[in-house]
Amino acid sequence: MPEPGYLHPTLRNIAADLEATGFDLPALGREIVEDYKRDRESRTEWEALHEGWVKLYYQKDKPVARNRWQGASDESLPILTEACNQYHTRMYNAMFGNREIVVARPSGRVSSVDTERAKRISLHMTWQLTVQDASYKREKDRLLLGTTLHGTTFTKTYRDPWLDRNVVQNVRALDLVMPYGMGPRSLADVERKTEVIWTTVNKTRMLAEVGYLLKAGTPTDKGADHYSAPDVAIREMTGFTESSGEEDYNKPCLLLESHRLVDLDGDGLAEPYIVTVDAESNEVLRVAIRWDTDELGNPIDAPWYDLKKPTEYYTQYNFLENPDGTYGLGLGHILGELNKACNRILRELIDAGMLATAGNLSGFINAAAAGPQGGDIMLEFGRFKKLPLGSEDLNKLFKTFDFKGPAPALLQALELLLGRSDRLGLNTEAVTGQLERALQPTTVLALLEQSNQGFGAVNERIVSAWTEELAKLYRLNGRHMA
């Protein structure tokens, strides 16, 4: 039995020990902050794409600035919104179809003891994720929608010192910054990952009090340097603004938790560690090992040459696998540009209709012929106005516009793009339950079965990632039972 106050080696903060041996912690802190800034800069265009998809989802993308006039159309079609909501709803129902969300199965030669143990594990982990963590299903709800729109969302499975239990926490792709790299790479192959963690100064003070952090964090201004472009768009779309005048203990604090390889012992071999840095002061607040050990600190499953195998805390949920990169592909990648094209045509149709009605009721007056007296003449429906024009020809005094209205080709193009968008997003009439014509029941069932092929493939990817996440939680339960 561990003694009171015992901490498992993977939970210990060794920053103070390193400092005592003369290790240059400030240089490590500066290196991590600089790496984080370079990694964020390398994905600037990636963030810009996601900013556009957020605006499309909220149907608030802005029209092109050129050739706009006051009152011009800025309406949007909810193509991306509807497709995301359809996928999200189906995936959520598939994941939580019953109350027992975890089912453990023994492998190999199974005995009755193994079967009973598997049942106990199933009940305990289901209790963990539905009762002990009452927000787990809600977090999965958010994860599924984010994955559908952006293509990738992560979860982090770890021992939370604040809650004193094992937790699974959502981490947006925006908040897990990795160096840009071409080619399909698994998450475990990325040797440097930095999580952006917003917390409060008071929480860092309490974590420093118990030794989890070396010292409290520094208040950080949530300015442009720390907000990503999609975050700025989300604030604008949702009408969210930061509160002001907070007490010092409640002010925000930005921590950078870097999962990386570091050579701390100077033997020329970098080993896996977790280094937490205060982004405002560049100070290292925590250093922890990132490999499995027993209670005495001996590496578990170490190869014969004693290399430490990195423990992966993050699980990646992809909507579609990306054959050319680490981050997955979502409906934003697939439908984003089509949605923009449909919005442009829709606005042109509305503007053309507006010009054909209100535009044809406006024009110019020949001031030289009509005289300098008087102002603009406003049209009043159902009434005739007397004008002091004498015998002058009205056609010489007034010039009205003759806008022809929307071109039929625009409407045909819009219908074509909408049809393609529905097919790409599997958002067809049969799926939404809004058939415009009567079909035989067997035909409807065949259409639904065909559309479900796409949903089923996405669900399989989500379930595969979910299984990986639960395996991480199972491993943590064996180390820190709670």
Image (cartoon, rainbow, N blue to C red):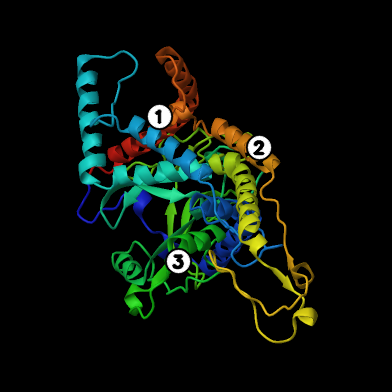
Among numbered discs 1 and 3, the one appearing first in the sequence: 3
What residue does disc 2 label?
Answer: 412
Give the vertical position of 105 relative to 51 (above or below): above
Q: Position of residue 413 (x, y in %)?
A: 67, 39
Question: How far, Cα to Cα, is label 1 from label 3?
Answer: 46 Å
Q: Secondary structure at mark 2?
A: helix
Tell me which amino acid carries mark 3. Leu
Residue depth check, mark 2 versus mark 1: number of the one nearer the observer: 2
Q: Nearer the viewer, residue 266 or 46?
A: 46
What residue does disc 1 label?
Answer: 433
Tell me which amino acid carries mark 2. Gln
Tell me which amino acid carries mark 1. Gly
Q: Is residue 460 visible?
A: no
Q: Secondary structure at mark 1?
A: loop
Q: Position of residue 192 (x, y in %)?
A: 56, 50
Q: Residue at x 59, y 45 (%)?
A: 339
Residue count near mark 3 (Cα–Cα under 10 Å), binned few <14, some 14–19, many ≥20: many
Q: Nearer the viewer, residue 139 or 156?
A: 139
Splitting the image into 4 quarters, where does residue 358 fall? bottom right
Splitting the image into 4 quarters, where does residue 143 fall? top left
Q: Residue at x 45, y 63 (%)?
A: 255
Q: Residue at x 34, y 46 (%)?
A: 139
What residue does disc 3 label?
Answer: 254
Residue depth check, mark 1 versus mark 3: number of the one nearer the observer: 1
Residue depth check, mark 3 versus mark 2: number of the one nearer the observer: 2
Q: Is residue 434 visible?
A: yes
Splitting the image into 4 quarters, where does residue 367 fall? bottom right
Q: Nearer the viewer, residue 187 or 441?
A: 441
Question: How far, Cα to Cα, is label 3 from label 2?
Answer: 51 Å
Q: Nearer the viewer, residue 117 or 149?
A: 149
